[in-house]
Amino acid sequence: MSEVRRRRAVVLVANDAAPYSRGLRIARTLTDLGFAVEIAAVGAPGLPREERDGDIVIRRYEPLGPWASWATGRARSRDPRRLVELAVKGLFWPVHVRGWWLALRRQLAPADLYHACGILAIPIALRLGAAARTDGRAGRVVYDVIDIVLESNSYPGLRGPLLAWHRRRERRWAESSDAIVAVNAAIAERVTERWRPVRPVTVLPNGQEARPVPAERPNLIRAATGLPPERSIVLFLGRLGPERGLDEAAEAVLRLPDAALVVIGFGPWADRLRARDAEPRFAGRHVTLPAVHPDQVQAWAASADVSIIAVPAASLNQRLSTPNKFWESLSGGTPVVVGRDLEVMRRIVEADDLGAVADPNDPADLARALAGILDRPPAAAAALRDRCARVSRETFAWEVVDRDYRALVGALVPAVGPVAGPTTLAPSGERG
């Protein structure tokens, strides 16, 4: 008789997980289901090799082998042949995580469940799952479609036949997975149409863990910035970089009589935005703060008067997106202004009157939408905040939206009996 072992799960995250909020929520659900859980992330300068979140182990694996020099995503300085480098990046995409893949193959202990967060993690998840099955583990693989990367503007070098080839590769990876998860119903419908999976796609939105909203609104942003109490706070959360609507949001806030744009996040534009804080026309109207831990975001979001997601919908991926910042704002009772072409978020906002919609490329229209929220009488403003928090808590809280995922995991890796041997769920097909 096979020995009964504690089930082990690995959440594969192709970033430094410092932290990655979706991966952390998934790991907490798996821990609650009785798994020993590891988040396997990418090593980064200044971050510890290992840390913990309760019983969850977060390990960062330094890229190894000949692909390690590509880990930054930049061309190698020692090779002056730029065209050759671009060809290598296109043909062997995604080259920047292949060194991480090698480290995982050599160093990661086998598991019963691999939850691959995104297209950068699914190829190695399939290889690891196959190896785990030879070790007597269940080795099940879940492909979490967090973005439609190959229908986005994230990789402009992928075009034409090369892009079509990578899309066929992704389809094979999806077909080889034991199950597919998507961040919202619209993306689930899109990948179902393209891949025709045998098992229905499980929708797992980026809902936030339910935390009680305090009777008195937090004041964290004003305490950190020194902004006066009469100045309205417009909040931007998340990654700081191009095509995020940051310039347009900054200009929109200047059109309001007394408001400030407060930016909380990380990314390549952080220094640029901090420099803007000091520019005379933005002084006191534009403040940049560092990112905060996901467990603290709700309180910081609740400290703002309105949140802005002014992303231009330049790709299908953006039009169908529902990023963490959207759910984080609503969970804190903070209404949102979203770009008019962000289809999924717009439907949610308009269905329950959770904010406003505007042209993300037009600062004047953004200012109009912001003013429509900020200028509400106190009773109407309080009702709006209560509605945002209630809809988030009752419909989109993590404890509500993860129920189907829990059932899926229970079917893939049962909680009782030996964790070994083949099952009808065993994947077949390309392993990376």
Image (spheres, rainbow, N blue to C red):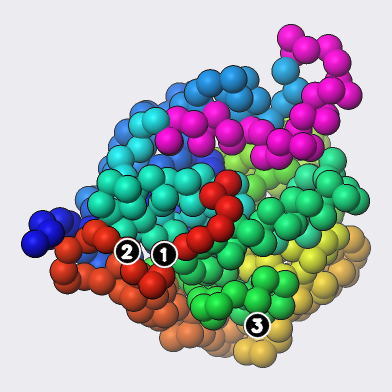
Q: Could you say where residue 316 lies in the image, as x and y percent from the top left?
A: 79, 66
Look at the picture and state if 104 lies above or below 112.
Answer: above
Check if mark 1's residue and mark 2's residue have beta carbons within 8 Å: yes
- Res. 175 image quadrant: bottom right
Task: Give yes or no for residue 78 being in the magenta stretch.
Answer: yes
Q: Which residue is mark 3?
A: 348
Q: Is residue 389 visible?
A: no
Q: Which residues are magenta?
A: 77-105
Residue located beneath label 1 in the image: 426
Query: Circle 2 is placed at which residue position?
Result: 422
Q: Which mark is residue 375?
A: none
Q: Quadrant of the N terminus?
A: bottom left
Gap in angstroms between the C-alphas marked 1 and 2: 7 Å
Left or right of 111 on screen, residue 301: right
Q: Is residue 129 above or below residue 74?
A: below
Q: Circle 2 — which element?
A: loop
Amino acid identity at mark 3: Ile
Q: Position of residue 124 (x, y in %)?
A: 51, 45
SS at circle 1: loop
Magenta part mainly helix, strand or loop? helix
- Image point (41%, 51%), residue name: 129
